[in-house]
Image: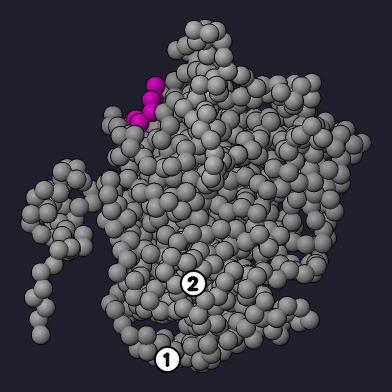
Amino acid sequence: MENTTKRYWRGLEELTNEADFIKNSHKEFGDMPNDEVSTGNITDGSGTHRRDFLKMLGFGVSAVALAACESPVKKAIPYLNKPEDVEPTIANWYASTYSEGGDYASILVKTREGRPIKIEANSLSSITKGLSARVQASVLSLYDNEKLKGAQIAGKPAEWIDADKLIINELTAIAAKGGQIRIVSNTILSPTTKKVIADFTNKYPNSSHITYDANSVSALSEANGGIIPLFDFSKAKTIVSIGADFLGTWISPTEFATQWAKGRKVSKANRNMSRHYQFETIMSNTGANADYRIAIKPSQEGLVVAALYNAVAAKTGSATIPAPKYGNVNIEKAASDLVASKGESLVVSGSNDLAVQQLVNGINGLLGSFGSTINLGKSVNYRQGSDVSMNTFIDDSKSGKISAVIFYNANPVYDHPRGAELAAALSKIGTSISTNDRADETGSLCMYNTPDSHYLESWNDASPKAGVHSLCQPTISTIFKTRQAQSSFLKWAGLNADYSKYLESSWKSNILKGGKSWTQALHDGVFETDSTSAFNVPVMNLAGAAASIAKSYLLESKGLELAIYEKVGMGTGNQANNPWLQELPEPVSKACWDNYASISQKTAKDLELAKDDLVEISSNGKSVRLPILVQPGQADDTVAIAIGYGRTKSGKAANQVGVNIFPFLGKTNSWNGGIVELKKTGEKRQVALTQTHNTVMARQAVVQETTLAEYKKSPSSGHWEAEVVTSEGKVPATDITLWNGHARTNHSWGMVIDLNACTGCSACVVACSAENNVPVVGRQEVINSREMHWIRIDRYYSSDADVEDRKALEIASENPEVVFQ
């Protein structure tokens, strides 16, 4: 019988296609392009609405409601309490693990009415003492409606049973003929997933696993015998970083930030702190927090390392190496401090050049860092990618040597420098399979799409370093008809095993021997032992490294050099369709919803460019168009562009936002992106900034700071007490506040931030959005100064102007000091 009951409420999804709603929608959502009005699509391409913005971007909740009505999986163990059924208004917490392309965090997931809503750090973990913005935002990616709803064959929806049958038949036929099968993935931290892949390769002996990372540190691994060393910044009294943004994006920034902060803690009892030197091209998050920051070009990076090696060698009585003389007073100062704190010093480099990493090892060897600030007993697993293996795979694909490929949650067509070559070569591969959660740039070119479930819907584990293990458990039933990639591999290998049972069995037989019970490990989320991994002081070919650096790097280069970097929020772009991350202001530039071409103040003046000027940047037949952002502190004659943008098949929030700069990286990028040409277009594109003032303009109370030397003289140095003149004379400002005199008879709330330890990473901004359902508004509304973040982190630069020159005080220094407030 038809339901004829009058309805008083209708959902937004129903309204958007009604003529009256479309006609009047501009009153609420602003003007829309004509083609979007006619279709009822009330997004404006860049996403600029004040209400229900996430729904417009495809973050619907109808499927989620159904999934939340079911228990996630009966074997999942709540972290704190475990009611038999979900109870309204009572939150459940589950211990789980975030592991994405080598990024790692042991987490607690807050669920309410069966829906994950918030993520916190697991205090039982020895690694995770804080979370990054990307981890905080990952809960929103669970609800992304742009993900595939089930399996696909040739771009059309298919039943899993049909896809599995065809895939197994094709793989079996290829194996019988001796055809080559490749599994391509980013770094996998899960030992059980690797065991599943091993089962698959046993079934198909001509299979092999290729690992690459979009944010590659392959040279660091190669220089250390195939592993990544375990660095400990907390033990370092002197830190020198050459291009490594270890507080923002390099390897394990949340872990490193916790270590670094320990060395910055100053109190009446402890009046010492670590000293930090940063040599870099862009003003990175790490550079903004350094004590001494020196701007260098990418082409000079190797020379800086060579000069530092020689300076340290001279001061320790060791042999120097032949290298072009790179003169900088800060190199001598840094070398003196490193030697003075020998055994408690650490030098790191973000370069992906093997010669540079070998020389860095040489410096750490002279300083006695191995065994102290570099742990010889353990290595880490965060980045396992091999540039050589990935380039070989692409070459083999182009020559027709590969018969089948499985892209396990990897998107190299987008995020590899040779992605265009791989895209063209995929047509030569007979069987192509993607487990990516959407038909992205790589998946859309594959014959089969077998979408993996979100990690909050999945069972898994991780081992970020020797002796450290954590578990991932589902916190909601699968929202769509997705399936864990591990289950797919087991199915295709002829092992119809339940992956949750497979995981439990693997842990009981390999990890939990003589330790916790499975239930306890699942409850805690982590299981840690004192296991060590073999790591010897690496063999250093210093002569060869010196010769390579002398050949590859330049004291003076001609033209503009391109510096390609990773943003704290956007990362490599695998979560680009997450609007929380798109709207997160980059900690230093305070820009969002775009990448841009940043240049120094001097370069802007020399080229007669201003903020928002649209320019064309070209190199080796490739070109992109981006707006200019003038960035204090950047090296002169350089232009910097962030990866992670320019997606074309990610979703409404990401598609056509910014440009893809990965193609500008070469096979081997000894100094990043090389020389580029820059041309004016005569057009403008406004950069969305959440902060448009760069300095405090001499306002005393905005920032209160002092130097360590002054603090040692007086702990109250730098503290400025405000006074107000009344009819009764001068009184402290606190005596006339709005809240003075109000008795606190109930709960009082307060928050204290240690600004000496705060790096400005902005994870709290995203966490606040998740905790309080803070809406995003889109690029245009940010430009209109209507961003809605409840927490704002201001970034202020120092100025060289005279304090009386108010206008000049608005201009930052060429290489400013930075403070986050």
**Residue stretch rendered in magenta on the structure:** 608-614
User: Looking at the picture, which amino acid does disc 1 mark?
Assistant: Asn
Decide if residue 224 is in sight here.
yes
**Overall secondary structure of the magenta section:** loop
Answer with left or right where residue 263 lies relative to residue 366.
Answer: left
259 falls in the magenta region: no
- Left-right relation of 461 to 512: left
Asked whether the beta carbons under mark 2 and mark 1 sit within 8 Å of each other, the answer is no
Image coords of residue 652 (percent x, y):
30, 56
**How many dots with numbers?**
2
Q: Residue at x 18, y 63 (%)?
A: 10
Say which residue label 2 marks.
475
Q: Position of residue 22 (x, y in %)?
A: 12, 53
- Residue that sits furthest to the right in the current view: 317
Q: Position of residue 412 (x, y in %)?
A: 46, 62
Q: Nearer the viewer, residue 709 or 682?
A: 709
Q: Which residue is mark 1?
A: 169
Residue at the spot 74% in from the left edge and 61% down from the top edge:
379
Spot occupied by residue 678 in the image (x, y as percentages of width and height): 40, 33
- At horizontal 39% and vertical 73% (from top left) the residue drawn is 68
Report whether 505 appears left or right of 364: left
Mark 2 closeness class: few <14, some 14–19, many ≥20 residues within 10 Å: many
Q: Toward the viewer: 405 or 276?
A: 276
Q: Quadrant of residue 758?
A: top right
Q: Quadrant of the C terminus?
A: top right
